Image (cartoon, coloured by chain):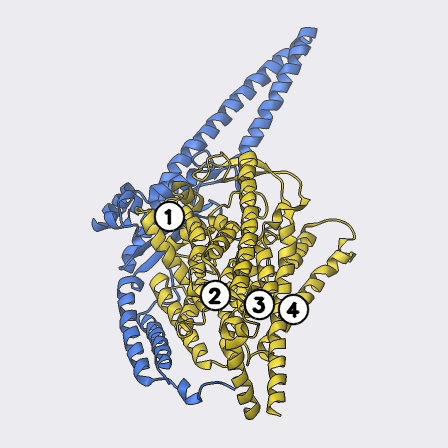
């Protein structure tokens, strides 16, 4: 084992550094031609994104609310920010509200609150939204800045400046980013750190970055496994220790009840009453969104014979497919551990996290942007990048199903975007777009292709080295 | 299979000791300035008649919660407890105070939670209890006004019913075609009066009518991390963990 291990490890080191060198060295002309083709394609995609923006703008002006894939509750615009900011000031965030946000989020929100509301918060969360929209507009601005920050990193040197700019614009105007901006969720802060996690230049900083990410969004803890699979126990322990100490320090600063957070997060993952069926179908990433929506529908429906129909069996079937896919990915992490870069392990574990359930939220797909340099340096970059790009396209413009009209309160009604503070009632029809149906499937294919690539790479390296050795 | 020698994973004791010491000091500072405050909580049940709160609509409870946080209320508490500094401490930040008293709606506006956070636990309990009593008194005034309107209407309906009954008796003795037509009008009026009286009486009886009261008297909360030693211990643990991570980072 030790001999074979040394051989494979030596091969791995060579392989890790030579993936981009195995192909025939392209000439300057062919590179320029490829670059031009890529830029033209990106410009076409940007035109598509801009047309979708135009459509959303027209829709809001015409009907007073944002269409699908934006969240079903039209009164709830920006409320991920304001609900959480309200509890940043009020005690009982962990005991009464049962928050699953780690303490650092509330400390960041307190700073935003001190800057935006110098005399303190008055009333409930809808009141503080009505009083001051600048924190939400700041979050929207961060959604525009974050992609620029990501593509400006050194890891993107393979792309021309024009291509980087186009990719940043395409992602900024994608339904995933727009959805996240409409929620004004703090998730965007993680995107400012992720490029360093996916960079091969800053491996010593990885444990610190991962520790902060875990404290922003606890599901990043699954990425710690990347160190175990790649055999880097030292960085695993470092990241665990740092994230634990950040949690303790920020918890002590924020709230003496912060240990209750651990119980809250344990119950959140298994709580099926937190989200609505239509809510999880907004920009779903996981196949679980389908099973969740079907289960929600079955619970509410009174249709006779429904529980004996094929629909009743679908959730189990969908969950089965999902778990087989995730198990395959875990197997790939194990099988490919020798030839796999740690950044690749991070990406696959991120995919597993986002696809394991609906609790990560569809807007977690914004993180794929930071992983583009990782995908670009793989053998199957064309397939992987195409899949990632498809996820960001406005697929939801194609409507598959339209619900019955209903009167709902809409925050954006009044036609005074983006400073509207008034609230009106609109007649809203819920739509199920193509994106809601296709994105979980694309995510599943992405996991399967990436996992297969890791397995085949490990197998081919092993075969080649054994042949050479013999 | 692991790249590192297991010995590299052993902690660097110097870094850990330094981390623990720094953490313990920081824990002590955090306890002194943040965690040594105690919070007393009292809950007020707002008055309600039928669908309306004591202010005659459904948003008055928010108004009541705001009134509790005003400077005037804080001054009243300070005067009652003989602690002048409380008026500045308790008033809401948006009313020029330090916001040590907070009132918020819970359970969909049926109850108002009053939280007072101070260093002195007896003072915190007294302040929360006094604030709750002031809220109840304030709500009771409005509640009494609303109830008297309902009661006056009931008395008025009773009088109208008596006069309609008198009229009915008079019409019964006449027994003409004209009187029969008037009788139908009187009966219709009596039915309306009866319906409204019944509705008002149902509205003004339990559980539709509820007088404002203190739902839960002021008590101290029991946070998970409450003592000096638990704060110092947790902070020392955090410091030790950072020291361990830094120590590992320097291992060759």
Q: Are marks 1 and 3 on the same chain?
A: no
Q: Secondary structure at mark 1?
A: strand
Q: Position of residue A171 (x, y in %)?
A: 51, 53
Pair 2/1: label in front: 2
N-terminal label among 4 and 2? 2
Query: What residue is disc 3 on?
Result: A352
Tint applied to chain B in the drawing: blue
A441 or A63, which lies in front?
A441
Query: What residue is disc 4 on?
Result: A325
Q: Residue at (41%, 68%) from the top-left corner?
A: A209
Q: Secondary structure at mark 3?
A: helix
N-terminal label among 4 and 3? 4
Tint applied to chain A in the drawing: yellow
Q: Secondary structure at mark 4?
A: helix
Q: Position of residue B12 (x, y in %)?
A: 34, 84
Report if the CB atoms under discs 4 and 3 are less than 8 Å apart.
Answer: no
Query: What residue is disc 1 on?
Result: B103
Query: What residue is disc 2 on?
Result: A218
Q: Residue at (55%, 37%) from the top-left corner?
A: A58
Q: Are marks 2 and 1 on the same chain?
A: no
Host chain of mark 1: B
Residue A209 falls left or right of residue B176: left
Report if the CB atoms under discs 4 and 2 are less than 8 Å apart.
Answer: no
Label 1 vs label 3: CA separation? 43 Å
Mark 4: few/some/many CA within 10 Å (<14, 14-19, 20+):
many
Q: Position of residue A432 (x, y in %)?
A: 64, 48
Label 4 vs label 2: CA separation? 23 Å
A246 or A203, which lies in front?
A203
Pair 4/2: label in front: 4
Host chain of mark 3: A
């Amino acid at each position: 084992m030790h001999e074979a291990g040394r051989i494979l490890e030596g091969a791995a080191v060579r392989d890790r550094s030579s993936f981009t060198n195995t192909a025939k060295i392209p000439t300057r002309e062919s590179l320029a031609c490829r670059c031009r083709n890529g830029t033209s394609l990106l410009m076409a995609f940007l035109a598509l994104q801009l047309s979708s923006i135009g459509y959303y703008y027209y829709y809001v002006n015409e009907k007073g609310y944002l269409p699908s894939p934006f969240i079903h509750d039209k009164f709830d615009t920006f409320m991920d920010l304001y609900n959480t900011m309200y509890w940043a000031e009020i005690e009982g965030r962990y005991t009464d509200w049962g928050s699953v946000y780690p303490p650092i989020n509330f400390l960041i929100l307190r700073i935003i609150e001190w800057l935006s509301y110098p005399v303190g918060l008055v009333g409930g969360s809808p009141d503080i939204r009505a009083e001051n929209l600048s924190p939400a507009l700041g979050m929207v601005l961060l959604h525009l800045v974050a992609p620029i920050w990501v593509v400006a990193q050194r890891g993107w040197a393979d792309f021309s400046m024009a291509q980087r700019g186009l990719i940043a614009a395409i992602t900024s105007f994608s339904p995933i980013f727009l959805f996240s901006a409409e929620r004004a969720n703090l998730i965007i802060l993680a995107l400012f750190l992720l490029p360093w996690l996916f960079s091969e230049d800053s491996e010593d900083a990885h444990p610190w970055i991962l520790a902060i990410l875990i404290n922003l969004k606890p599901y990043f803890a699954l990425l710690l496994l990347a160190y175990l699979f790649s055999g880097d126990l030292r960085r695993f322990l470092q990241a665990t220790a740092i994230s634990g100490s950040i949690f303790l320090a920020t918890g002590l600063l924020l709230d003496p009840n912060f240990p209750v957070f651990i119980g809250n997060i344990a119950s959140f993952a298994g709580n099926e009453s937190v989200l609505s069926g239509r809510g999880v179908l907004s920009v779903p990433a996981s196949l679980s969104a389908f099973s969740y929506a079907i289960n929600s529908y079955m619970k509410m429906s009174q249709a006779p014979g429904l529980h004996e129909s094929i629909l009743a069996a679908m959730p189990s079937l969908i969950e089965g497919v999902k778990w087989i896919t995730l198990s395959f990915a875990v197997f790939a992490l194990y099988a490919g551990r020798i030839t796999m870069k740690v950044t690749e392990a991070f990406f696959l574990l991120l995919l597993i996290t986002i696809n394991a359930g609906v609790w990560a939220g569809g807007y977690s797909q914004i993180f794929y942007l930071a992983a583009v340099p990782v995908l670009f340096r793989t053998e199957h970059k064309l397939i992987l990048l195409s899949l990632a790009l498809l996820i960001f396209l406005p697929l939801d413009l194609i409507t598959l199903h339209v619900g019955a009209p209903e009167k709902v309160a809409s925050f954006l009604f009044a036609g005074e975007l983006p400073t509207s503070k008034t609230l009106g009632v609109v007649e809203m029809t819920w739509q199920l777009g193509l994106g809601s149906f296709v994105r979980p499937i694309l995510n599943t294919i992405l996991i399967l292709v990436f996992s297969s690539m890791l397995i085949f790479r490990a197998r081919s390296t092993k075969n080649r080295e054994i042949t050479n050795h013999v | 299979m692991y790249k590192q020698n297991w010995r590299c994973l052993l902690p660097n004791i110097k870094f850990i000791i330094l981390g623990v010491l720094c953490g313990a000091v920081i824990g002590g500072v955090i306890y002194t300035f943040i965690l040594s405050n105690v919070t007393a909580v009292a809950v007020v049940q707002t008055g309600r008649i039928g669908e309306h709160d004591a202010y005659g609509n459904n948003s008055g409870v928010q108004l009541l919660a705001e009134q509790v946080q005003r400077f005037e209320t804080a001054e009243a508490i300070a005067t009652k407890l003989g602690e002048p500094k409380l008026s500045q401490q308790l008033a809401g930040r948006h009313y020029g105070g330090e916001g040590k008293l907070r009132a918020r709606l819970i359970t969909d506006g049926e109850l108002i939670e009053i939280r007072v956070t101070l260093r002195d636990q007896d003072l915190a309990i007294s302040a929360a209890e006094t604030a709750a009593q002031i809220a109840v008194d304030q709500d009771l005034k409005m509640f009494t006004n609303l109830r008297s309107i309902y009661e006056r209407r009931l008395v008025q309906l009773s009088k109208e019913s008596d006069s309609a009954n008198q009229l009915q008796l008079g019409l019964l003795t006449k027994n003409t075609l004209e009187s029969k037509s008037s009788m139908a009008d009187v009966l219709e009026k009596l039915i309306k009066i009866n319906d409204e009286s019944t509705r008002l009486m149902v509205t003004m009886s339990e559980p539709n009518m509820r007088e404002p009261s203190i739902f839960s008297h002021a008590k101290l909360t029991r946070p998970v991390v409450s003592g000096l030693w638990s704060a110092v211990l947790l902070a020392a643990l955090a410091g030790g963990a950072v020291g361990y991570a830094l120590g590992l980072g320097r291992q060759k």
